[in-house]
Image (cartoon, rainbow, N blue to C red):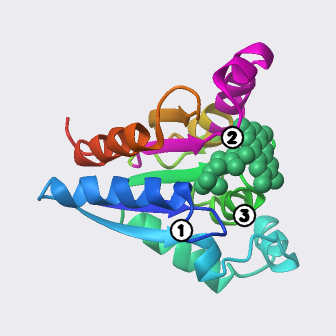
Amino acid sequence: MHALIVVSHPKPGSFTHSIANQVAEGIAASGAHSFEIADLAAEGFDPRFSAQDHAFFVGEGKLPADVAAEQARLDRSDALVLVYPVFWWSFPGLLKGWIDRVFTNGWAYVEEPDGRIVRKLGRLPVHLIAVAGANMRTYARHGYFGAMKTQIDHGIFDYCGAPVARSELLVPDERSHEAHLDTVRTIGRSLFAG
Ligand SMILES: Cc1cc2nc3c(=O)[nH]c(=O)nc-3n(C[C@H](O)[C@H](O)[C@H](O)COP(=O)(O)O)c2cc1C
């Protein structure tokens, strides 16, 4: 089995990148599975939903080549892992733009003429790993993690039928960086178990 690990952070040496790398190491340590890391910032992915994206959305143009390439990576993957810092209680804009552009009508879901939505990503389990700056008390007080789950887990992935296998929020006050790294390595090792 093959995992696509998408990481969205501008700094290669960041904690967020360490988390993505540990998930990858865990997958490698399983001995049976493979991974690819999609580092959106390093690869220069353009998150802007362009006129060409819009033309495709309304059925009047071709799918942009960079979007087709991202869909091809997902088509050859058996699981998607998203690793990102929480920016304004959600995805960073770079990752949101990746979703906006790549999860197209026709590929991620199909909107039928009668308005019915056909979910197309039932074969793709999703593992979400968000790295927080604020503490758990702040998340609890305002319901921010619940809001993120509504918007991301349900609003995006459930809409497309992709099962959310895991939704983690790594908060700085609960455990040390090392403990978080251990946890995600275990997640990587057991990504395809069961
Ligand atoms: C633009 C911006 C917005 C942020 N918004 C939030 C936020 O809403 N909630 C939060 O917990 N942390 C927020 N943070 C803090 C980051 O989540 C935190 O710095 C990051 O997860 C730490 O990981 P790193 O060491 O890999 O950068 C924000 C940081 C930036 C730069």
**Numbered mark located on residue 94 in the image:** 3
**Is disc 3 in contact with disc 1, using a CB cutoff of under 8 Å?**
no
> The N terminus appears in which quarter of the rendering?
bottom left
Residue that protrudes farthest toward the top in the picture = 141
Q: Which residues are magenta?
A: 124-152
Q: Is residue 132 magenta?
A: yes
Return the x and y of residue 15 as percentages of the image width and height: 53, 55
Q: Quadrant of residue 154?
A: top right
Quadrant location, the C terminus = top left
Report whether 183 appears left or right of 69. left
Residue at image mark 2? 133
Where residue 19 sits: x, y (%)? 45, 53
Q: Does residue 1 appear anywhere in the picture?
A: no
User: Which comes before the other along the chain, label 1 or label 2?
Assistant: 1
From this viewpoint, which residue is outermost toward the bottom?
65
Which secondary structure lies at badge 1? loop
Q: Residues within 10 Å of mark 3 (few under 14, many from 20)?
A: many
Q: Is mark 2 within 8 Å of ligand 1?
A: yes
Q: CA distance from mark 3 to mark 2?
A: 18 Å
Residue 102 percent coordinates (x, y): 63, 65
Q: Is residue 27 visible?
A: yes
- Residue drawn 84% across and 70% down? 54
